[in-house]
Amino acid sequence: MSDAIIVENLVKKYGDIEAVKGISFKVRKGEIFAFLGPNGAGKTTTINILTTLLKPTSGHALVAGHDVLKEPKAVRKKIGIVFQEPSYERELTAYENLYIHGRIYNLKGKELHSRILEMLRFVELDRFKDKQLKTFSGGMIRRLEIARGLLHIPEILFLDEPTIGLDPQTRSRIWEYIRDVKKEYDMTIFLTTHYMDEAEQLADRISIMDHGKIIAEGSADDLKRLIGSDIIYVKFANGDATKDIDLSFAKSWKLLKNDLLEIIVDDASKAIPEIFEKMNERGFKILEISYRKPSLNDVFIHLTGRDLRDEESRPNMMQIARRRFSGRR
Amino acid sequence: MDAFVVMVYRQIKRFIRARSRVLGTIFMPLIWLIFFGLGWSKAFDFPYAKMIFGGVDYLSFLVPGVFAMSIFTGSLMSGISVLWDKQFGFLKELLVAPSSRKAGIAGRVIGDSLVIALQGLIILVFSLIIATNIRITGIVPAILTGIILSIAFSSIGISMALKMGSQEGFQLIMNFLLMPLLFLSGAFYPIDTMPDWMKYLAYIDPLTYAVDASRYFLIGFSKFSIFFDMVALAGLATVFLLVAMFLFERATIE
């Protein structure tokens, strides 16, 4: 069996509202798989179904070989989760938090103790093991939560928006840990995110989700190929080059300024030598040449007509409030 | 069984760490004892009053009531806090873990009731200083009564939290359940002097039997037989603990 997660026609309705509208996908063993989409796309609902916290309205989901509806306990044994909303005891120390988690997963004694120390070292929190979590920063808490998700060495690790609300340095550090998890523990990782860069940096494959549906799936490169183009910018020294040069290999081209040419092609790595050759033949001098790959954001715009970054810049007050107020008790 | 033990451990550890919270929870009962208790105690300082209050002064009469009140409110609140806990808190951890959910939630209830009974003990020890007719020998059985009472109302709180699902119901319960149950329980005044219609309500208020049992142990006076009080309380605790365990087993986070 090479699929860690198999989902078929999964539907979740809340009353009349369809949060997940019949999605199907597979996650291969050992890969990092990302659900990318704006807030409210149905990502968390899906993760809640896969982790047996929520019952689907219809459809099937197999996680680590077990049906989430028929064998929830078998699924729970094989998964680890880092929730979007923090769920820890701020009065207790890092060690105690992991200890409680370990005991719930039937670990105990020396094995549990050495596992806790190993995981604290892994996320570089071993120095803080006896500090109460109320003294931790948001990034440290996230790292501890990752350590906790790993403690019982699950087959599949679920990460729901793992870097939401964190600063850029902390985010890239969390990314490193996630990559290391895959390397060191050979784990399958399922993550949801509304950050394009996060999906692009981490995921082997990405499903773009919008309004409860998967609208595209593949590696970041596959997805960008949906636009099918690279964008090349050529700056040249003398005169208007476009009159004399045959640009028939390009999908389209446009003169942006007198001396700046934008050429959209399928494959820039092949097109650039050709441009050089043709410019040389005609005796034009190239001052600068650069090309840009379309971003995942371009893909999202291409597919939905909306900008993923717009949704991102609009702060989700509910989420912020939750992060602030939870863990108070 | 691990889940049970570790949840008891967690509740106790949390209690030990959060000293300010402990202070906060015993503050209100102490206010009741000192101001309400001492205040009325002077007003009720005549022979007929003593007769109504089971042969003791009003402050001593009030102590078992405030003791039961603090355990009752503490337990109900802690149970209802599961409402937040299952969405944002640690209970979510328990819901996705392979261990027994029933054992986990039972561990939480027992852990909470030990902690809350300990707070009750602090109140009783304090009351020994200001009230004159409290029996020291009654403290241990009163604490045991407190633990049973706490198991009952933590479980009731949890069951309501799991059924409610939303936070809007919270205020409703506080208004329509907490205060009436308190006033009907005979904690502040005897049931015998209540109007008849109120008496009947008092009889179906489970808190009545906890107040009555505490009074039996602490001042040697009770309206019902202690056996009946304890059977009623233990029955209630057992039934609602089972209900809470059953509901938590099937809980989702809609």
Image (cartoon, helix red, strand yellow):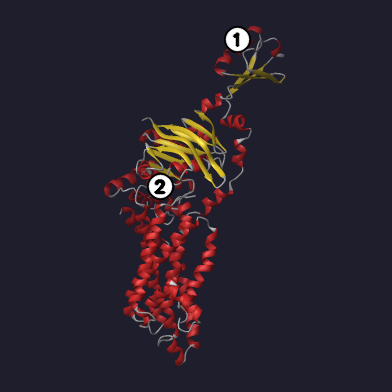
Q: Which of the two residues, A137 or A322, is positioned nearer the viewer here? A: A322
Where residue B185 appears, as percent x and y from the top left, is: 45, 75
Numbered mark located on residue B96 in the image: 2
Numbered mark located on residue B3 in the image: none
Where residue B24 appears, as percent x and y from the top left, is: 47, 67
Q: Is residue B114 above or below residue B188?
A: above
- Label 2 amino acid? Val
Q: Secondary structure at mark 2?
A: loop
Where residue A57 appears, as percent x and y from the top left, is: 49, 43
Chain identity of mark 1: A
Q: Quadrant of residue B11?
A: bottom left
Residue reaching furthest to the top = A281
Q: Which of the two residues, B72 or B156, is positioned nearer the viewer here? A: B156
Q: Quadrant of the N terminus of chain A?
A: top left
Contact (CB < 8 A) between labels 1 and 2? no
Q: Which residue is disc 1 drawn over?
A: A277
Q: Which of the two residues, A13 or A147, is positioned nearer the viewer here? A: A13
Where residue A289 appears, as percent x and y from the top left, is: 61, 19
Q: Is residue B3 visible?
A: yes
Q: Is residue A170 above or below residue B185?
A: above
User: Does A290 sit left or right of B67 as displayed?
Assistant: right
Q: Quadrant of residue A300?
A: top right
